[in-house]
Amino acid sequence: MTRRQKFMLAARLAMPAILAQLSSIMMQYIDASMVGRLGTGPSASVGLMSSSLWLFWGICSMATMGFSVQVAHCLGAREHEKARSVLRQGFTSVGIFSVLMALLGVAIAPSLPHWLGGDESVAADATLYFTVFVAALPMLTLNYICGGMLRCAGQMKVPSLLNVLMCLLDIVFNFFLIFPTRELILFGSPVVVPGAGLGVLGAALGTVFAEVVVAVLMCYYLCWRQDGLNIARYARGSFRPTMAVLSKALRIALPMTLEHAIFCGAQIMITIIVAPLGAVAIAANAFAVTAESLCYMPGFGIGDAATTLTGQSFGARRFDLVKSFTHISVGMGMAVMTFMAVILYVCAPLMMELMTPVREIASLGTEVLRIQAWAEPMYAASIVTYGAFVGVGDTLWPAVMNFGSIWLVRIPVAAILAPAVGLAGVWIAMAVELTFRGMIFLWRLWSGAWLRNRSAA
């Protein structure tokens, strides 16, 4: 393949993945903006629980990667029956795991808002919001594993389109569940629009309903339509996990899961640091995190493409292609997120005004978003490089690097700056840490150790 052909292949895989990531974030953006219309209290309730939800979602998502990476290697080696076997075992393993995580989440939900420093004015809504989401973890995990398997098979369009559908369904469900029955002016005439008036609960239920519909459709396409993985057409085969597949899945997923838990633990610590700054700061921080996601999610989409390209190339033992696709993907990711950072800086006021009518929240959110924009290019380097490392099964050292960067740089700097500078200090700490993280990931990429160690194994 010429360099141009490699770039075009990477771009064709990345574009649907970027669309999928953006649609996922748009769903959060829609939830946040709709809840934002209810006032500061409901907004703070949702914002208080966001980092904890990311912890549970992310752990389940990382658990699926141990199986999808194996499938990518099998497909790269043209071992289709083995790939289907790994898929069956993955369904069983992550299904049991997600149920256990859901039970844990429901058990701690009543106490969690108080552990995070929230007061009584936000605790009830926060508990309700968290409980609904965490109880739906098994269906969300089904979405994760089916989407991950399709992407590792090189099928990017279907997961992307289904995620766009999920975004549209979320808008529809939220529209009728969050707000009460009201009268709207349509083409100059009053129209009565029915509504459940559930507020924060409606936002959670709307998103969960959308996720359930898409999870079912994603599972259908994977099991009945996707070549090489359509297990419904190959009825013979056990769903019982084997030690060989489980142990390999653990070696791949455990460092990633621990790394994500550590990352979300850091986010929870940030929430605890922000909570004493008041409800306005909590809401502004949550809205700014969601708005910033629109900037960095293209990087995660390109990272997904890098995982597929390096995973299948590694499975085929084409180490030259692994290196080439990694460099192309990292360059693409940094270019795209630099462009998105410019948009973020310029459009920050508009983005915040769309999410909340409260001027104090919008103004504070705009300030911190413009601080964060400067760190986006190096953040892209860490995201896409990490995706390439995952494709070859190199997850331990990247997890250690993330741990050191977040806990030894971001948390101490945020704790020092927050009392003196307020929320802006927390985001300065984040920008410094993400720049440092990008530098150390690029250093590991250029060193070549990530590929030498795996190819020798």
Image (cartoon, grey):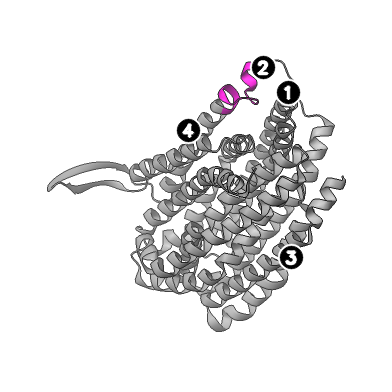
Q: Earlier in the sequence, mark 2 or mark 4?
A: 4
Residue 443, numbered label:
3
Q: Earlier in the sequence, mark 3 or mark 1?
A: 1
What is the spatial separation of the Cα atoms under label 2 and label 4, in whole angstroms? 25 Å
Q: Nearer the viewer, residue 448 or 405?
A: 448
Residue 81, numbered label:
1
Q: Earlier in the sequence, mark 4 or mark 3?
A: 4
Q: Nearer the viewer, residue 274 or 4?
A: 4
**Residue 60 seen in this snapshot:** no
Q: Residue furthest right?
A: 456
Label 2 SS: loop
Circle 4 residue: 213
**149 inside magenta stretch:** no
Inspect the image, locate mark 3, and give the three-letter code of the amino acid beneath it: Trp
- Compared with 54, 437 (above or below) is below
Nearest-to-viewer mark from 2 and 4: 2
Q: Earlier in the sequence, mark 1 or mark 2?
A: 1
What is the spatial separation of the Cα atoms under label 1 and label 4, in whole angstroms? 29 Å
Q: Earlier in the sequence, mark 1 or mark 4?
A: 1
What is the spatial separation of the Cα atoms under label 3 and label 1, in whole angstroms? 38 Å
Q: Are marks 1 and 4 in contact (CB under 8 Å)?
A: no
Nearest-to-viewer mark from 3 and 2: 3
Inspect the image, locate mark 4, and give the three-letter code of the amino acid beneath it: Val
- Going 65% across and 39% down the picture, which residue do you hit? 98
